[in-house]
Image (tube, rainbow, N blue to C red):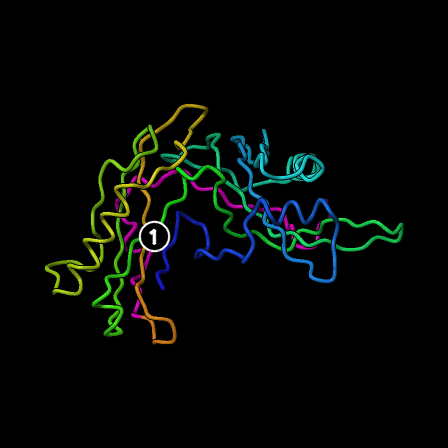
């Protein structure tokens, strides 16, 4: 098992159904085996924290897309900051929805919480690194963290290991090798500031652990972010749990 964080998104957790399959089930209506529905979208946040635009994933049925645009457009974010000033920026928002029956005999979609929803474009999948077989078999885990410079094209221009500091032992070197191989293939949507792409830094911790084992100690994220030109971050202010689309 490999856990890693993407920007300010929670640790990756993907349901058993693909987003497209979940959306198809939602379009058909809830059944006895109703599943959570994962809905992803691109959101542009204005410099005052209001939502300027919402573009739901094309894999979602049109009724859900329309409901998301209407509802999310009313939400508010903390004012996005870049280099000490308020700016407009873009972000990816993922929601976990559940279908609930209505008194009219139909159903509505309730927002449960925010969650990681993979981008439907496989180029932006950010696939995790491979767990070295010889370390997994020996139940050897490890924690690393990288400061990644993302260029205006969304590609990693540089990856600096921030943790652990100093020389690595054989296990650490193996984890570092697979981590860098994975990072080299990653692609982000360019980070926008007032509509223009910018180069900026993200900190991504990675934890390698065999399921059932005690996970390795993770580094303190705040201290590792010191000195980085962090990419614009967004944070919802609106309380969304329980809201109906």
User: Which residue does the image show at 60% across and 52% down from the upper left?
Assistant: 96
Quick check: 132 above or below 104? Answer: below
User: Which residue does the image show at 20% across and 67% down from the upper left?
Assistant: 134
Q: Which residue is mark 1?
A: 128
Badge 1 marks a residue whose secondary structure is: loop
Q: Is residue 239 magenta?
A: yes
Q: Left of 112 or right of it: where is 120?
A: left
Q: How many numbered markers are drawn?
A: 1
Q: Left of 239 or right of it: where is 216?
A: left
Quick check: 152 above or below 32? Answer: above
Which span is picked out in magenta? 216-245
Q: Which secondary structure type mostly characterizes the magenta part of the structure?
A: loop
User: Which residue does the image show at 34% across and 76% down from the upper left?
Assistant: 214
Q: Residue furthest right?
A: 104
Q: Position of residue 173 (x, y in %)?
A: 15, 59
Q: Position of residue 2 (x, y in %)?
A: 35, 61
Question: Is disc 1 surrounded by few (<14), some (14 to 19) or many (20+) residues within 10 Å?
Answer: some
Front position in the image: 178 or 190: 178
Residue 20, by quadrant, is top right
Q: Is residue 173 magenta?
A: no
Quadrant into which the N terminus falls: bottom left
Front position in the image: 3 or 71: 3
Q: Position of residue 104 (x, y in %)?
A: 89, 50
Residue 100, by quadrant, is bottom right
Q: Position of residue 184 (x, y in %)?
A: 25, 42
Q: Left of 243 or right of it: where is 189?
A: left
Front position in the image: 51 or 160: 160
User: Which residue does the image show at 51% across and 45% down from the upper left?
Assistant: 235
Quick check: 223 above or below 48? Answer: below
Front position in the image: 148 or 3: 3
Quadrant into which the C terminus falls: top right
């Amino acid at each position: 098992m490999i856990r890693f964080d993407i920007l300010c998104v929670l640790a990756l957790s993907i349901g058993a159904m693909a987003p497209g399959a979940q959306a198809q089930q939602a379009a058909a209506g809830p059944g006895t085996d109703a599943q959570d529905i994962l809905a992803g979208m691109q959101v542009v946040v204005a410099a005052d924290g209001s939502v300027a635009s919402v573009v739901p994933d094309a894999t979602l049925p049109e009724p859900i897309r329309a409901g998301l645009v209407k509802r999310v457009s009313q939400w508010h974010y903390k004012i996005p900051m870049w280099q000490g000033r308020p700016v407009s920026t873009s972000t990816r928002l993922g929601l976990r929805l559940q279908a609930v029956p209505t008194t009219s005999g139909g159903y509505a979609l309730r927002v449960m919480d925010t969650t990681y929803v993979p981008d439907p474009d496989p180029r932006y999948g950010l696939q995790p690194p491979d767990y070295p077989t010889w370390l997994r078999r020996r139940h050897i885990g490890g924690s690393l963290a990288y400061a990644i410079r993302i260029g205006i094209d969304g590609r990693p221009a540089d990856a600096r290991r921030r943790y652990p500091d100093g020389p690595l032992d054989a296990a650490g070197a193996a984890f570092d090798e697979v981590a860098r191989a994975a990072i080299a293939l990653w692609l982000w949507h360019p980070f926008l500031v007032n509509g223009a792409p910018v180069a900026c830094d993200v900190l991504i911790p990675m934890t390698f652990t065999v399921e059932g084992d005690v996970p390795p100690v993770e580094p303190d994220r705040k201290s590792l972010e010191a000195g980085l030109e962090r990419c614009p971050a967004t944070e919802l202010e609106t309380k969304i749990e329980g809201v109906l689309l």
